[in-house]
């Protein structure tokens, strides 16, 4: 019998032993990883909402805060057993952001918090700081692992990266009793949030303090500390109740203004992420694109001072988002700082239904947010989660109100349940509303365009129209007429990054071919279909890498009885493309439904400035003396009314112009245009009174485009 050489036997044994060790390690490692599965995005958002509910509803405050470390090879159950009594572990761990795979003997670091009811507290945290101060205690946790940062260099700089990081902050403890009670107006620490981001993340929510646990540009943990007094808590609870009372199942939310103008700012496709920004294909803006967008939005808010901001989807990029809560707070910080109301509707960024609902619940908990979570019966009857209707009534100009409708273009479409929702809203505002006054001005916003945003043949347009690829939508083309029949004057969308135009969609006047079959009830209606364009610098632009980011504004002028729109550019922060969306003439009825009467049809035939033959192009009437005097006497600032010849009416076939639309030259047709008063008084019910008028954006000597070039 042949014998195996003993050297080969040792070699074979070594190989088998090595394989066994590798298998055993992999099995143990995988089980440990599974036992340390991080919370889902939905779980993290719910944790924040639950803690906020406890803080406000039950009046809890933070009585102690510590750092707690747990080795990776421990199961979560065993790890939690070591947490000191009375403390609750906040998730995720502070080192969640570390990209390198951690060894099984590395540590995870958690923030643990102790809370008690305000009236039962004897010892509490009065303040938290990143600097050592007299009377402050240090809170520190030091790692002992051997992990390395990117590039293979060991991290010894007392910063995050691998397991050698040191997390350190300082807390000031205070004692309260009958002789030294906490005063009603004394802010105390109510909650601590764990965020992740770079240096551009600031929690701008009122009462919040942002503490970066690193000074590096890379992603790192951030503590958001909420300090509120008892009086602040009472005000927040009152605000939440008012928000709930303002909403009804059938009519949405009712808002009021006593100002002569109401301004809406639209933001779309901001594409924020956890890091500083996303590089474009040219390798530019790798570390500044998100911050650049934040500054653009901040400057526009200061210049325009809108009453409400509508965000039409793709607020953040999930692929660049480690923690949704952090990215949402980052993206909204200019809005929080401006203390302006806002509403958000989903775009294409989130598909998972559970995540969408959790994100919406988080939005609804934010200050100034008009979003609410729909009730179960609404979820069953209307597609999507972010469908809202707001009626803004002017208390000074009786009979005038604005309807602002937001739809959720879930799965890139508007479906029949949402059209039914629009008709229910129309019936409510005309038959069941408390004031009995239907809205005179109607605007609609959602993310994904409907088919008519791809016009055919000859059409009128203001702005640039670059993206012409087929739309991936199942929206019924007839829904366009339904939207018109519900009285809307403009629909504004996002999604298409390099389109910023407004397209005039017209329904020809034909006998027996009105919006309702067999009825001649439409003297030739039209609606503006507007794009916002991309606002965020981290979003992709395929046709032009250096495409200038933009945002859109709408202004309802109750005194002049008109709706205007214009855009702002990021590069020079300037407004441009002022245009008239809708105007109620002196001899026209005020309300939408009145326009369907025979009398209104006759008046519309005589006054409609968007209809007529080629010999009667879009030429607006001049401002009368009364309107001039009213504009000049506006205490927000005088604006000169001038006549301009900048409106173009160039006509050509779309196919011939396809490669030249971006640079269509204006003709010399001289059209009178109305100079717009850009100074706007603000809505006291919507938000606090503004600063002095000198700080506001007074737009002078501008021209309104009431016509448009034809393509």
Image: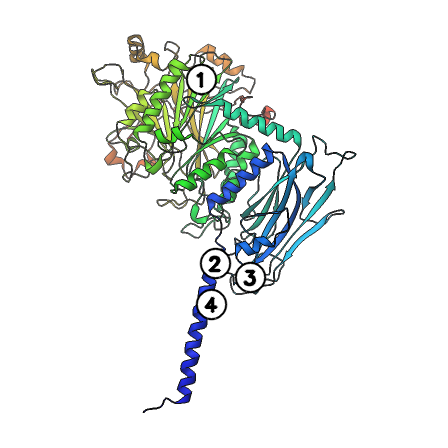
Mark on residue 75? none
Q: Is residue 333 left or right of residue 134?
A: left
The label nearer to you, 1 versus 2, is: 2
Q: Quadrant of residue 353?
A: top left
Q: Which residue is mark 1?
A: 401
Q: Which residue is mark 4?
A: 25
Give how far across and how far down residue 390 sits, in percent. Answer: 44, 23
State the separation of the CA atoms marked 3 and 2.
12 Å
Query: Could you tell me which secondary element the residue under label 2 belongs to?
Result: helix
Circle 3/circle 4 CB separation < 8 Å: no
The label nearer to you, 3 versus 2, is: 2
The label nearer to you, 3 versus 4, is: 4
The label nearer to you, 1 versus 4, is: 4
Query: Could you tell me which secondary element the residue under label 1 belongs to?
Result: strand
Q: Which residue is mark 2?
A: 33
Q: Residues within 10 Å of mark 2 (few under 14, many from 20)?
A: some
State the separation of the CA atoms marked 2 and 4.
12 Å
Give how far across and how far down residue 222 sits, in percent. Answer: 58, 47
Q: Which residue is mark 3?
A: 106
Q: Nearer the viewer, residue 351 or 294?
A: 351
State the separation of the CA atoms marked 1 and 2.
57 Å
Q: Nearer the viewer, residue 376 or 551?
A: 376
């Amino acid at each position: 019998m042949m014998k195996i050489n003993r050297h080969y036997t040792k070699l074979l044994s070594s190989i088998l032993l090595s394989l066994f060790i590798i298998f055993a390690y992999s099995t143990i490692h995988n089980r440990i990883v599974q036992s340390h599965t991080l919370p889902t995005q939905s779980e993290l958002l719910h944790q924040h909402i639950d803690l906020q509910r406890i803080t406000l509803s039950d009046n809890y405050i933070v009585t102690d805060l510590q750092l707690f470390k747990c080795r990776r090879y421990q199961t979560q159950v065993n790890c939690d057993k070591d947490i000191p009594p009375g403390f609750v572990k906040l998730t995720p761990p502070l080192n969640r952001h570390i990209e390198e795979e951690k060894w099984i003997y590395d540590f995870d670091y958690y923030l643990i918090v102790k809370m008690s009811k305000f009236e039962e507290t004897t010892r509490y945290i009065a303040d938290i700081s990143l600097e050592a101060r007299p009377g402050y205690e240090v809170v520190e946790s030091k790692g002992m692992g051997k992990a390395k940062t990117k590039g293979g260099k060991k991290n010894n700089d007392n910063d995050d990266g691998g397991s050698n990081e040191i997390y350190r902050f300082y807390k000031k403890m205070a004692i309260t009793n009958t002789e030294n009670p906490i005063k009603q107006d004394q802010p105390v620490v109510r909650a601590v949030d764990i965020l992740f981001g770079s240096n551009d993340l600031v929690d701008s929510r009122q009462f919040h303090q942002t503490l970066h646990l690193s000074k590096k540009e890379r992603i790192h943990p951030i503590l958001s500390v909420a300090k509120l007094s008892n009086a602040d808590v009472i005000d927040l609870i009152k605000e939440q109740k008012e928000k709930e009372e303002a909403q009804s199942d059938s009519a949405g939310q009712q808002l009021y203004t006593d100002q002569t103008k109401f301004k809406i700012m639209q933001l779309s496709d901001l594409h924020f992420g956890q890091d500083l920004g996303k590089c474009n294909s040219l390798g530019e803006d790798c570390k500044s694109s998100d911050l650049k967008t934040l500054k653009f939005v901040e400057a526009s808010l200061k210049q325009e001072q809108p009453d409400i901001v509508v965000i039409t989807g793709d607020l953040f990029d999930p692929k660049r988002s480690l923690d949704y809560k952090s990215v949402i707070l980052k993206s909204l910080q200019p809005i929080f700082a401006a203390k302006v109301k806002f509403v958000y509707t989903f775009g294409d960024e989130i598909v998972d239904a559970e995540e969408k609902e959790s994100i919406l619940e988080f939005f609804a908990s934010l200050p100034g947010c008009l979003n609410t979570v729909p009730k179960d019966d609404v979820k069953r009857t209307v597609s999507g989660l972010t469908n809202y209707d707001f009626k803004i009534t002017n208390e000074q100009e009786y009979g005038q109100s604005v309807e602002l409708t937001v739809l959720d273009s879930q799965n890139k479409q508007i479906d029949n349940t949402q059209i039914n929702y629009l008709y229910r809203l129309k019936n409510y505002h005309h038959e069941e509303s408390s004031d009995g006054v239907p809205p005179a001005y109607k605007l609609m916003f959602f993310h994904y365009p409907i088919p008519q945003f791809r016009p055919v043949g000859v059409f009128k347009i203001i702005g640039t129209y670059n993206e012409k690829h087929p739309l991936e939508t199942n929206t019924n083309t007839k829904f366009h007429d339904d939207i018109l029949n519900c009285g809307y004057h403009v629909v504004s969308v996002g999604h298409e990054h390099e389109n910023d135009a407004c397209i005039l969609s017209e329904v020809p006047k034909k006998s027996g071919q009105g919006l309702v079959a067999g009825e001649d009830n439409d003297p030739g209606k039209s609606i503006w279909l507007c794009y916002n364009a991309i606002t965020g610098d981290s979003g992709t632009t395929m046709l032009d890498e250096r495409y200038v980011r933009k945002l859109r504004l709408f202004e309802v002028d109750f005194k002049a009885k008109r709706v205007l729109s214009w855009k702002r550019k990021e590069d020079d922060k300037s407004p441009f493309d002022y245009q008239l969306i809708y105007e109620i003439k002196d001899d026209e009825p005020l309300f939408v439904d009145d326009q369907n009467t025979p009398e209104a049809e006759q008046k519309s035939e005589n006054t409609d400035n968007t209809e007529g033959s080629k010999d009667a192009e879009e030429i607006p009437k001049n401002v009368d003396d009364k309107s001039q005097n009213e504009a000049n006497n506006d205490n927000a600032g005088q604006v000169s009314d001038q006549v301009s010849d900048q409106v173009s009416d160039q006509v050509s076939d779309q196919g011939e112009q396809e490669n030249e639309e971006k640079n269509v030259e204006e003709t010399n047709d001289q059209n009178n245009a109305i100079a717009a008063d850009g100074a706007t008084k603000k809505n006291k019910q919507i938000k606090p009174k503004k600063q002095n008028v000198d700080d506001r954006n007074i737009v002078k000597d501008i021209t309104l485009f009431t016509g448009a070039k034809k393509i």
